[in-house]
Image (tube, rainbow, N blue to C red):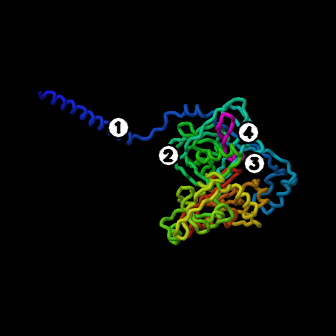
Amino acid sequence: MTRPTIARAEISRVPLQLIWIATLSMLLIFAQALRAPAQAPESLAPLVDRISASVVNITTATTVARQSGPQGIVPEGSPFEEFFREFRNPEGEDAPMRRSSALGSGFVISEDGYVVTNNHVIENADEINIEFFSGRELPAEVVGTDPNTDIALLKVEADEALPFVNFGDSDAMRVGDWVLAMGNPLGQGFSVSVGIVSASGRALSGSYDDYIQTDAAINRGNSGGPLFNMDGQVIGVNTAILSPTGGSIGIGFAMSSNVVTRVVDQLQEYGETRRGWLGVSIQNVTDDVAEAMGLDTARGALVTDVPEGPAAEAGIESGDVIMSFDGVEVDDTRGLVRQVGNTEVGKTVRVVVNRDGATETFRVTLGRREEAETASAGTGETPEPEAPETSDVLGMTLSPLTADLRGELGIDESVKGLAVTEVDESSEAWEKGLRAGDVIAEAGQTQVMTVSDLEESIAEARDAGRKSLLLLVRREGSPRFVALGVEESE
């Protein structure tokens, strides 16, 4: 009568041994996988074949004044240069015009011909021509642009459905994920480069920035082209590079798709962006400010000014610290600006502030930022400098952009900043590729209009213990970032 009991015991022991053996085998396999180096995809050719037809080259043409007369008849910087300037261009405003062309990239997002690119690729263009992977060419019209994110939406008319690509979720991308860039680098035609996500959430020069940083090669002409994930979805629009020479050194930036899609949707619906506007000037809450105000943590957005607008009408005051907006906690000013901008115009939201140590809640009906900016510009609150102010800073001779200087250097009216009129060849600025005719638009993520603005940014960087300052430099409309040392010599 005991045999069935023994048999049952033997049967129960065998599966337990197998489980232990299987578990140990799995652990060994997992350990070997952890030690194994990451492998690149065997080939990207199938992916490229599937999505390449949606990537386009963009050629623009612009009419500009042509300089007539002999060129280079006096050395640059000569005391006779001013005298001969009129001789080189005797017709003045009646000088003959010439056609200037530029190259960029883009991608089709719908079968009926909507194309996304960078605003700076098509800015001020008289003609825009789209060249498809097949070699076919079609003219394009501008649907709308957003200089704040450097995005433009174009439209072409085709007789048949066009191949297109979809946007992916840029927030799902992790540092180390594979990405693929396509475009028209240096005007060489269709080209592919591959790399990884080097960083995410980069804020470089604007309030709405959310850049993906990648080491995939991006050069001039790649601007406006797509950055793909390995599923063939667009997770970024290639926009700028950080480079001392103007060529790729493996630090490129693509505006994240989650920002681009919101902009594109508004441009497609309205032909313009419509961002929410709270109507406050704000700054970050630092540790010393938090201590002085009796705050437990250094977070939130400190209101420094409340002009006429939605916040003032709701009762928000200067000195309030905004702790939450529309149910979302506010960590810093950048997060608040982006959240407000992404909220629909006319929506009534709850804004929680800390005022004199107590919490108060206000209901604010958001206005439209674009209308507020237009009204502010009309009041002359940010006038052009009245008189030229030239100074030598960081090895460069700089001057605000006057009408005469714009004409001399061929700089468009839409470009703002400091003109580089001369660069010391022994300076770091020269080594990193800055030249006369460049325009410094921002320093330390702050717009610069005067030499004093730049000097203030340099002083702030030194006070913060930083060794270098990030400059946004524009050359012929193309942006790039250059880091210059600001340490004082002893």
Q: CA distance from mark 3 to mark 4?
A: 14 Å
Q: Residue at x 27, y 35 (%)?
A: 19
Within 10 angstroms of label 3, few (less than 14), some, or many (20 or more) residues? some
Q: CA distance from mark 3 to mark 1?
A: 59 Å
> Which of 56/84 is in front?
56
- The three-letter code of the residue at mark 2 reads Arg
> Which of 85/8 is in front?
8
| Range of residues picked out in magenta | 105-123
Q: Please state the total of marks drawn on the protein image.
A: 4
Asked if residue 394 shows in the view, the reply is: no
Asked if residue 377 shows in the view, the reply is: yes
Which residue position is annotated with label 1? Answer: 29
Which residue position is annotated with label 4? Answer: 140
Q: CA distance from mark 3 to mark 2?
A: 36 Å
Q: Residue at x 83, y 47 (%)?
A: 97
Secondary element under disc 3, as helix, strand or loop, is: loop
Percent x, y of residue 475: 69, 52
> Would residue 111 appear left or right of 36 to someone viewing this image?
right
Mark earlier in primary sequence (4, 2): 4
Mark earlier in primary sequence (3, 1): 1
- The three-letter code of the residue at mark 4 reads Ala
Mark earlier in primary sequence (3, 2): 3
Closer to viewer: mark 2 or mark 1: 2
Mark earlier in primary sequence (2, 1): 1
Q: Are the two marked residues, 2 and 1, in contact with CB atoms closer than 8 angstroms?
A: no
Which residue position is annotated with label 2? Answer: 174
Mark earlier in primary sequence (4, 1): 1
